[in-house]
Each structure stands twice: as C-alpha cells, then as structure tokens.
Image: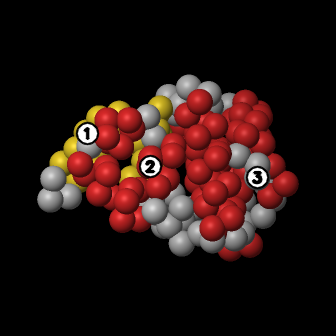
Amino acid sequence: VFQNYALYPHLTVLENIAFPLEVLRVPKKERLEKAEKIASLVHVENLLKRFPGQLSGGQQQRVLLARALCSTRKLLLLDEPVAGLDPKVTANMYELVDGLNKSGVSIIMISHDIGAAVKYASHILHIGKKIFFGTKDEYLNSTLGKLFTEVEY
C-alpha cells in the first residue's frame, strides 16, 4: 500500500479492489465476490460503484488496503498509510490495520509516528543515528525509546 493513492482512475472502487485477481485470471464471479467481501472488511462496501476521484483521502487509502488484501492475505507492506489524513481518519485507519494484524495478517509498516508504532507494533525497527530492533517493550526500556517517548509525550 503506497503513500500516494495509486488507484486506477478509470476503474470503479470494485474494479480497483478486484484488479489483482483479474491479473491472476480468477474467474469474474469469484473475483467480484472476493472483492466485495474484502470491501466490507475495510468498510468501503457502500462505495463500490464510485470512481477514485469521488473519494476522500481516507476512503482511497481503504480501497488501496482492500486491493492489497485481494492479492495477499499473509503479509502487507504499508508505506506511511496515514500520510495526509486527518486525525480521525488516521485513528480509524490504525484501528483497521491493528484489527487485520490481530486476524493473522503480518504487517510491516513504515511510519514517522513513534506514538503509533509504540501503540500498535509488536516489534520496532528504529533507524536513525542509532539503530534499534526489538520488541515494543525492549524499545520502551531502551535509551532510544525513553528519549523519544519523553520528548514527544
């Protein structure tokens, strides 16, 4: 899932979500059923006939997430999935990602939001002047983690 909204402007939301399955030559009926199911999972089932230009930023991010879920259900790589979204939509998106993770989807998320990383991550890779990799608790107990959590909160 990219930071920018890489949706196909000439395709509807349903067609955008189902696109990976079309590439894999999944029969039309099956791919549309799966796309509709995943659309409801990310709460865009009421937008299926719209085009990307008719969606808000948060809605577009949810469609991107749904499209990614159509191509895989095991691992998602999210590059700043909440960049440019308002705080309420950001919170909803993080809750959605957290729910997907708890349902068994492994997620690698790039974020500059230390607070979100500490709240939602099981492991943290912090790259800066010093590099840290470990569990959330190890991060919070590290010098680096204490520095950032004290400065930002």
Q: Is residue 2 visible?
A: no
Secondary element under disc 3, as helix, strand or loop, is loop
Q: Earlier in the sequence, mark 2 or mark 3?
A: 3
Measuring from the top left, give residue 74's x and y in whole percent: 50, 28
Q: Badge 2, how many Cα within 10 Å: few under 14, some, many 20+?
A: some
Figure quadrant of residue 97: top right
Relative to 139, is 46 above or below?
below
Residue displayed at 68% across by 64% down:
88
Figure quadrant of residue 96: top right
Residue displayed at 45% across by 40% down:
121
Q: Could you say which disc has been placed on residue 53 in the image?
A: none
Circle 1: residue type? Phe
> In the rendered structure, are the residues bearing label 2 and label 3 in contact, judged by CB atoms less than 8 Å apart?
no
Q: Could you say which disc has been placed on residue 117 in the image?
A: 2
Q: Could you say which disc has been placed on residue 44 in the image?
A: 3
Measuring from the top left, give residue 112's x and y in whole percent: 39, 61
Secondary element under disc 1, as helix, strand or loop, is strand
Secondary element under disc 2, as helix, strand or loop, is helix
Marker count (numbered): 3
Q: Is 102 placed left or right of 29 in the picture?
A: left
Q: How far apart are labels 2 and 3 at the CA level? A: 25 Å
Q: Earlier in the sequence, mark 2 or mark 1?
A: 2
26 or 100: which is nearer to us?
100
Q: Which residue is mark 1?
A: 133
Circle 3: residue type? Val
Relative to 96, is 57 above or below?
below
